[in-house]
Each structure stands twice: as C-alpha cells, then as structure tokens.
Amino acid sequence: MELIETVDDMRRWCEGQRAFGKTIALVPTMGFLHKGHLELLRVGRYLSDVLTLSIFVNPTQFGPSEDCEAYPRDLEGDLSKARHAGVDSVFVPTVKEMYPSGYQTTINVEKLAGHLCGTSRPGHFEGVATVVAKLFNIVRPHLAVFGKKDYQQLKVVRRMVEDLNMDIQIVGVPTVREPDGLAMSSRNRYLGPEERKSATCLKKSLDLADEMISRGETDPQKIKRAMKELILAHSFTQIDYVSICDPATLEDVDVIQGKVLVAVAVKVGRARLIDNSLLEP
C-alpha cells in the first residue's frame, strides 16, 4: 500500500495505473474510519482494479462555530484498516497542499445545497463540492464511492459531476448501522453512555415515519410532529431539522403521494447526528 502526501505524487501514481489500463476507485473520507467506511472500501475494491482512499479533514466545510481541529483523527489506525481492506494507495495531503497560498476558487451547487443541512451549515456543501472536485481532478478516478447516510452530500456530488461533465461514476452505498440501529458515524465517539442510548431516537423516528406512511398517512406535518415528540422524549436531544421532502430536489412536500426522503438532524449532547430513509406509501 502506497502512502502519498503530495498532489504531484498522487497524480503520477494514478497516471501509472491508468497506463496499465486499470480502473481506479476513489473513496474520499475525513478519516477516523469505522465499519461504514470499510463498506465503502469493500464496494470500491469489488468494482475496480485499483482502490484509492483519501484522508483529509477539509477545513472549508466546517462552519465558524464548528471546530475543525477537534474532529477525531487516527491516521495510524486508519492505515491499518486500509491495509486490511485491500487499499492500494492512501492520499493524505496537508491543508497547505490542498489550499496553497492565494487559493480563491470554490464550487457551489446552488439549489440542492440550500436545503436540510445547508440551512444550518451555510457554506458546508460549497466546501464539500470544492474539495471533492479537487480530489477528482487529482486522482481522476473512474468511479467514486459515497455513503447514503449523507444523502444530501451524495446528491450534491452527483449534481456537480453531471453539471461539470465529469466522466466519473458515483456509487451510493446503503447506511451501515450498529445493532441497535444507530447509523455509523465518526461523531458517535462524542457520545457518552447515556447520550449513546438517546441517539437511537433518530432511527426510531424514521421507523415511526415508515409505520405512519405504511398505514396510509399522507400529511407530512402530522408525521413530523410525531417524530419530533419521539425525539424530544429522549434526553440530551436538540432537533436541527425533521424533513419530509422530494428525493430529487430536497424540497419539502405538502402531501405524500409517492416516494419521499425522510431526513433528520439531531444534536445529542455535543454530537450532531444525521440519518434518513427513503419511504413510499
């Protein structure tokens, strides 16, 4: 497994792989790998000849009140997991390498970024789109793998790829969960024992929405009220949003007539957690 730190070295390595006719899969991450990330790597390994993992805590996707430096890191552990997952190269650039002095270009996927997490985290998806575009230009992968837990991120990246005519296949992988239903996330490490129990309310609220829609409820407001009551009945919870929206546009729906995205963002203690389900009558 190659550990690569500079843009030029990463480009040269990937060019060498393409010269041999190999297909490259990229799994972009911010590190602190868990089983969800390992599933992305498994899918990337299956779909390609060469698997590349990027580990970069991207400062441009953190808001003013979010501490980029506090984001969990474990490079040694990540590299060990990457080796066991069959990763061929790991790209670990510094902030200065990715954003050299004088850098001033960003990418904004306007409409999709304005909903859900984009409301409470202005500029977040501009940072995501920009760093992903840079990684795509450096690695030039044939395909890139993302988790569906970050549904909005997946939609933003797919929109960017289509709009900018990037010849890259974007693969979405279902959410990996703990036995009690909690979605795998690097931020779960912030949860204390009691907060960890309360965090299951995200999945429980999605299950409640599924049950209500299956029974024929078509009023999203009634469903959202019930979901919020369930969430707030758990300790340490503060709701960012509960949304029932169009899966394509992420705009709220007035009546549930077909498939909808039910998405939640809840702060449990100091951890801001997200989850979602695609549901239909």
Image (spheres, grey):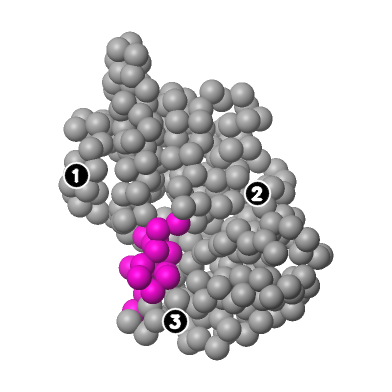
Residue at position x 32%, y 43% in the image? 42
**Earlier-in-chain disc, 2 versus 3:** 2
- The residue pinned by badge 1 equals 84
Q: Is residue 167 visible?
A: yes
Q: Nearer the viewer, residue 58 or 277?
A: 277
**What is the spatial separation of the Cα atoms under label 2 and label 3, in whole angstroms?**
29 Å
SS of the residue under disc 3: helix
* Figure quadrant of residue 89: top left
Which residue range is magenta in the image?
175-192
SS assignment at label 2: helix
**Residue at 63% in and 62% down:** 279
Can you name the residue that lies furthest to the top here? 19
Q: Main secondary structure of the magenta part?
A: loop
Question: Residue 86: x, y in percent?
Answer: 23, 38
Q: Which residue is mark 3?
A: 198
- Residue 113's label in the rendered image is 2
- On the image, the x and y values in percent for residue 274 come to 52, 64
Q: Which mark is residue 185?
A: none
Residue type pointed to by label 1:
His
Report crowding for label 1: few under 14, some 14 to 19, many 20 or more residues within 10 A (C-alpha). few
Which image quarter is the C terminus in? bottom right
Q: Amino acid at mark 3?
A: Ser
